[in-house]
Image (cartoon, rainbow, N blue to C red):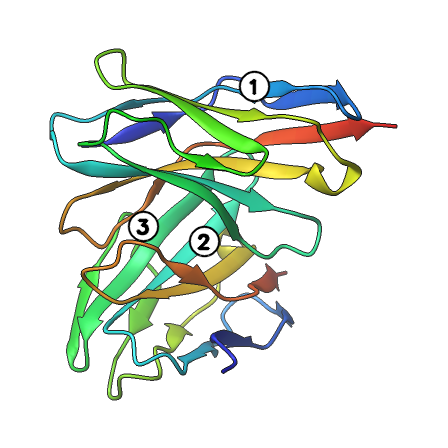
Amino acid sequence: NAGVTQTPKFQVLKTGQSMTLQCAQDMNHEYMSWYRQDPGMGLRLIHYSVGAGITDQGEVPNGYNVSRSTTEDFPLRLLSAAPSQTSVYFCASSQPPLVIQFFGPGTRLTVL
Amino acid sequence: AQTVTQSQPEMSVQEAETVTLSCTYDTSESDYYLFWYKQPPSRQMILVIRQEAYKQQNATENRFSVNFQKAAKSFSLKISDSQLGDAAMYFCALRLQGAQKLVFGQGTRLTINP
């Protein structure tokens, strides 16, 4: 049971490049979320999903796309990376009615 | 909208002593959950303790306990017998009943002095 996994652990992009951050969980959780962590600001919700085929925007969705084709996977896409997207990205999952969210190890993204 | 505020960017404590980290929050809802997460240098987010708003009794997990004051919207974390492994960033977070979103505070960096 690997829990929540994220790849890659580190990534450097140039402005305008695109990439996908991968997130997978093997706990059969319905809920999955993406957060970004910036210095002095804690974690902020980007997008979330309450089940396969269902996604919604969080607090800071601009510049990011998501999809949820399976219960296990919830990729985060940056279509045209900007320096403002330099951050640490966390994926999390949970299973209602339980309220605890399980976090992945994070991806550190730098956009030059 | 919900907000969570941690007014102490940094704290330090001597090993084996007790330290209290502060957290205040704001919500108009009555059903919610509060959490403290620990983030060591490894970056992993680790759940330390949680509190259900409908419970008056303060949650306790070994050396970690909370002081939950619902009327004051305060949720502090007390770490007793501090250990070197407690050094980390600590985040306070709020989640409404039935909601997916966790709202985090800015974090408090805790240093343990040997």
Give the percent coordinates (x, y) of residue B26: 24, 23
Q: Which residue is mark 2?
A: A36
Identify the residue at horizontal 28%, vertical 18% (top origin).
B73
Identify the residue at horizontal 13%, vertical 36% (top origin).
B31
The vertical placement of A45 against B11, above or below, is below
Q: Tell me the subunit letter for badge 2.
A: A
For residue A60, which numbered disc appears in the image? 3
Q: Quadrant of the N terminus of chain B?
A: top left
Q: Amino acid at mark 3?
A: Val
Number of residues whose C-alpha sits closer than 10 Å to that of mark 2, classed few (under 14), some (14–19) or many (20 or more): many
Mark 2–mark 1 Cα distance, whole angstroms, equals 27 Å
Mark 3–mark 1 Cα distance, whole angstroms, equals 31 Å
Q: Are marks 3 and 1 in contact (CB under 8 Å)?
A: no
The vertical placement of A30 against A109, above or below, is below
Q: Amino acid at mark 1?
A: Thr
Question: Could you say whether the residue bearing mark 3 is in a helix, strand or loop?
Answer: loop
Q: Are marks 2 and 3 in contact (CB under 8 Å)?
A: yes
First along the sequence among labels 2 and 3? 2
Number of residues whose C-alpha sits closer than 10 Å to that of mark 3, classed few (under 14), some (14–19) or many (20 or more): few
Q: Are marks 2 and 1 on the same chain?
A: no
Q: Nearer the viewer, mark 2 or mark 3?
A: 2
Q: Which residue is mark 1?
A: B20
For residue B64, which numbered disc appears in the image? none
Q: Quadrant of the C terminus of chain B?
A: top right
Residue B65 in view here: yes
Q: Nearer the viewer, residue B86 or B43?
A: B86
